[in-house]
Image (cartoon, grey):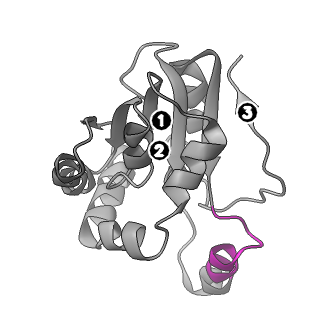
Amino acid sequence: MQTITPDIKARHRQIWALGDYPSVAEDVIPTLGAELVDATGITTGDHVLDVAAGSGNASFPAARRGAHVIGSDLTPELLESGHPRSEDLGVDIEWREADCEALPFDDGAFDAVISCVGLMFAPSHQKSADELVRVCRRGGRIGLLNWTPSGFVGQRFAAMKPYSPPPPPGADPPSLSIKHWRPMRAR
């Protein structure tokens, strides 16, 4: 497998900075962040890392539960859109630019590591998964909410595939053949 070049990540940043993701999070998927927080069992006092957090659609409900939250994303413009909203909501979230394939956090630093419709767009799913496991404490929780091939968005990706360029060499497509969801605990 080829290594992902820094230029691919720079292009990812540019693409995500172009659109209005905060509107998508609020208008299209407004409940998904809270559903992920519920499913992951996040509660008061938990140290939570929201990976590929975008504008914070999962960070906000985790912080409202009383968790200590770091919202991280490769795209600083998305984090910049989340910061004022956290102030408006009166929740304390630390916003950090971070690459999900090389997270700048210590091993076992978090009780829960989550990603709501974000991590699936990382170039290397395996590198990203390895990083989630690394930064999650032993016995902690990892929760991912992703589009699946059989759902509406997965079907849309499939319909667009003939008209879209393939992922760059070494990069995984956003929606792989995820057949079943199951909770995962860090070892």
Which is nearer the N-term, disc 1 or disc 2? Answer: 2
In what element is the residue under mark 1? loop
* Amino acid identity at mark 1: Glu
In the rendered image, residue 73 lying in the magenta stretch gets the answer: no
Q: Mark 1: few, some, or many residues within 10 Å (few <14, many ≥20)?
A: some
Q: Which residue is mark 3?
A: 184
Amino acid type at image mark 3: Met
Residue 99 visible in the picture: no
Q: Is residue 159 left or right of residue 109?
A: right
Name the residue beneath numbered marker 2: 4
Q: Is residue 17 left or right of residue 46?
A: left
Residue position marked by numbered label 1 in the rendering:
101
Disc nearer the start of the sequence (3/2):
2
Q: Amino acid at mark 2?
A: Ile
Report how far apart the C-alphas of labels 3 and 1 lie in the structure. Answer: 19 Å
Identity of the residue furthest to the right in this view: 179
Q: Residue at x 59, y 53 (%)?
A: 35
User: x, y (%) of residue 181?
Assistant: 78, 50
Tag shown at residue 15: none
